[in-house]
Amino acid sequence: MINLCTLFDSYYLDKGIALYRSLERVSDDFTLYIFCFDDKAFEVLNDMCLKHAVIIHHSAFETPVLLEKKKERSKAEYCWTCTSVTIEYVLDHYTVENCTYLDSDLYFYADPQILYDEIRAAKANVVIVEHRFKKNKYGRKLEARNGKYCVEFNYFDQSLNGRKVLKWWKDKCYEWCYDQPEPDRMGDQKYLDNWTRDFKGVYELHHLGGGVAPWNLEQYSLVRMNGNDILMATADGRQFPLVFYHFQNIRYMPGRRVNIKSQTKSKKLKYAIYIPYLKEIEEIRSMLVQDYGITYELHGIIRSSNPIIGFLQKHFAAFKVQSFSDIINLDRLDKYRY
């Protein structure tokens, strides 16, 4: 049994449901513990009766200390603060040998068991995934800002090693967790940079199909696509199946347009990955409107508790365009070819 956890509120319900559906398509041997950060998300997910999900209300894990942090941090910063908390909650309250945190904007294309086979072979207690930025000046700049590793697929087991690392991470995030790059910290993420040095049992995932995302997509090409089965290749010809993709930073724009911010110029590759996902998101949104009255008004995402940075994120981030083929018309999704 694969034990996973994720967290989101009703604004991310569309992405969270897409994550769950993707897992259900590729595996029948998993449990996804979903931590709901508002009442509406809890109500909707309970009503949907998801076979492989356990739905957890925010009041179950929010302590007085966390509620104080909630007052001083942005919504995103508070979610980052709670990442380690949700993993610990599953390990403490359920009969599981391990638990893997997933960002809610992940989407699975292949059975993640292939990743757990690697983890078991490595005898890992903790698993982290490298960003795999390009090995150039820009990639080094991104790593300096965001850290070497990404909080997206983070495995912890019940061992003393696993628990030690998890507690250290939780304590650090309680102390400081902001959308503000500093030399040794950035949100909940840069804390991971020295884990392989400072702790035992920490393993860096090798499978390239676990951790494909906009910040590394440019390094790969599409070999073939058969439904959700996507085979990719590196520049030197190494082929690998896409296990999961991180749909981070999709931004909605006026006029039923979306800026996918794929960071690759290859239309074939970006459309193969993004167009089916956007179709599913649109289908889920229609269901949420019709069945639950949840609407998604156009508004930006605020990650930072800094009011100036937050204003820029809310009003201008969607309009930062690197490639015009990243601007997708949601009313013409069937017209895109890949």
Image: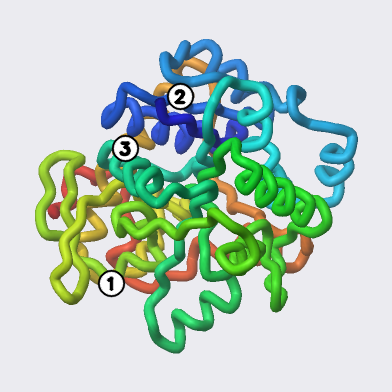
Disc 1 vs disc 2: Cβ atoms closer than 8 Å?
A: no
Instruction: Determine crowd level at label 3: few under 14, some 14-19, many 20+ residues with C-alpha closer than 10 A.
Output: some
Report the amino acid beneath label 1. Gln
- What type is the residue that disc 3 sits on? Gln
Q: Is residue 125 left or right of residue 265?
A: right
Residue 335 on image: x %, y %: 16, 48
Above or below, 261 relative to 138: above
Q: Is residue 89 above or below residue 242?
A: above
Q: Which residue is mark 1?
A: 219
Task: Tell me: 37 left or right of 318.
Answer: right
Q: Residue at x 26, y 59 (%)?
A: 270
Image quadrant where residue 260 sits = bottom left
Toward the bottom, the furthest residue is 137
How would you rate the neighbour count of disc 1 (Cα within 10 Å): few for under 14, some for 14-19, many for 20 or more?
some
- The answer for how far apart the CA atoms under marks 1 and 2 are is 32 Å
Which residue is rendered at x = 55% and y = 36% of the image? 6
Closer to the N terminus: mark 1 or mark 3?
3
Q: Which residue has dot 2 on it?
A: 31
User: 230 or 330, which is in the foreground?
Assistant: 230
Front disc: 1 or 3: 3
